[in-house]
Image: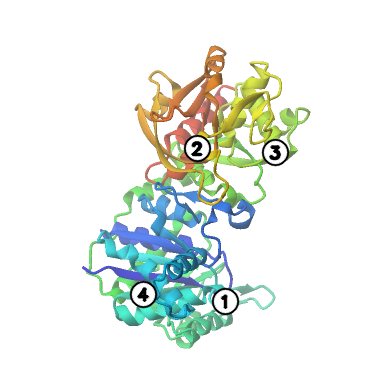
Amino acid sequence: MATKYIFVTGGVTSSLGKGIISASLAKLLQARGFSVTIQKFDPYINIDPGTLNPYEHGECYVTEDGAETDLDLGHYERFLNVATSQANNVTTGRIYYNVIMQEREGAYLGKTVQVIPHITDEIKRRMLLLGQTGEYDIVITEIGGCVGDIESLPFIEAVRQLRWELGVNETCVIHLTLVPYLKAAGELKTKPTQHSVRDLSEAGVQPDILVCRSEHHVPMDLRKKIALFCNVKQNSVIESLDAETIYDVPLMMRKEKLDERVISKLKLPHRADPELDRWKEFLGRLKNPTSEVNIGLVGKYVELHDAYKSIVEAFVHAGAANECKVNLKWFQSENLSDENVAATLAGLDGILVAPGFGERGFKGKMEAIRYARENNIPFFGICLGMQCAAVEFARNVLGLEGANSTEMDADTPHPIIDLMEGQKEITQKGGTMRLGAYACELKKGSKAYSIYGKSKISERHRHRYEFNNTYIAAFEEAGMLATGINPETGLVEIIELQNHPWFVAAQYHPELKSTVLNPHPLFTKFVKAAMNYTRNK
């Protein structure tokens, strides 16, 4: 079967949930036995999100092959339980960069390089790339931004061309739009949807299916009106209500028969109804917890929860695995000090210190770690969280005055955390960190080994600084053990504290590999430790 292509566009406003709809549709098709992948095309000119401040675009998601990508790829992996790659996220910046590099190499033989055909040809090439591998029956392409935005026009034009080139039954366009409720008038309004579809049609693309986001039920008479004015069949006007959890959306889309409409449009072979038993079991555990814990997330970007999206979702997965409701409490690390940390963090059953870069909030993170260490509260550190744990231990247990990371103090007398050797000659910021999956060997008898249940693991990374192995002996003598080591470089991947109920910190990002069907063991065991702490209070 030739690969079929689905394009998901959005209108009226951003943040309607194109990524969740794409992931939900992919889950339904996958559950019917189709091989599916999803890719995201973003209209910004950055080559990738790697240099973006989390306040700008949420977290930067890292794939197995080391691509710094949009956070929607995290949704794709969490829903499908299938790894994405560099090919699954493309930006306008990447498209223009590739075209300009080809022009510099003389690939266009002196012709004038233009948006059409050169930019659109490169977009189409990238849109078709995954489908040409032969691995997938269906490729879903999410187009970032809103229809009508000037930045999105080349992507929409590429979709128009592909629709014509591939054939009417080889592609399907799903347009996600908003049907707002006007409280004063007491009714839903379809005009924004009509205008959004008009803008898409003016660009030469007629949607096949409309997914209408709304806070209220969209009755059949309104669906009929939308269908009439937007040139789609009435049964292709799909309602998407606000959900209790994003993991409800696949079942909601199944009820609305979104997958059936797509199968009909693409003339896909009819297969058995979606096999969603494990998904429903997960939802059952998620919605019917038997216990509850309060876990503090200490970070510097806590005002925007999307900055830690994968961590939040990993706690959802871990909570469901333990039949436990995880109440995340958010703490701005800048606001924590020796004077207020005990009062601020009182009542928590566990503390996670989040990843990040830079000096802002560094001291507050160390205060949170000291509080957890001294009061035997379960602690989990990730990336910079691990580095903070090492510096805090060096200062307050080993007594190494002025101990620090060279990221924060280049002249520290005790560089507990230092720039990686391979990073010292690098000047460019984008795409130059230690990125992607690396091996780690766990010491038998350690807490890390008992958590994973094996000695060899692979986890994803995103960092420039590492634990300085000069200090390993002093740390271990004082009870802080290095229990996870990269077998090739000797890089310390995990540290854990002896004589503490649960004190584990990792240089890597375990949250990036947690999925609905495979919750990450570090998160599940951390939640379990928090549950035990609650019982023993």
- The location of residue 280, given as percent across then percent down, is 37, 50
Q: Secondary structure at mark 1?
A: helix
- The residue lying at 42 percent from left, 50 percent from top is 78
Residue located beneath label 3 in the image: 361
- The location of residue 396, given as percent across then percent down, is 67, 19
- The residue lying at 47 percent from left, 85 percent from top is 201
Sequence-earlier tag: 3 or 2:
3
- The location of residue 9, given as percent across then percent down, is 47, 72
Any part of residue 288 in sight:
no
Residue located beneath label 1 in the image: 150
Which is closer to the viewer, label 3 or label 2? 2
Kind of residue at badge 1: Ile
Mark 3–mark 2 CB contact (< 8 Å)? no
Sequence-earlier tag: 3 or 4:
4
Q: Secondary structure at mark 4?
A: strand
Q: How is the image coloured?
A: rainbow
Sequence-earlier tag: 2 or 1:
1
| Quarter location, residue 214 | bottom right
**Cα distance in 3D space between marks 3 and 1:** 38 Å
**Cα distance in 3D space between marks 2 and 1:** 40 Å
Kind of residue at badge 2: Gly
Circle on res. 172: 4
Circle on res. 422: 2
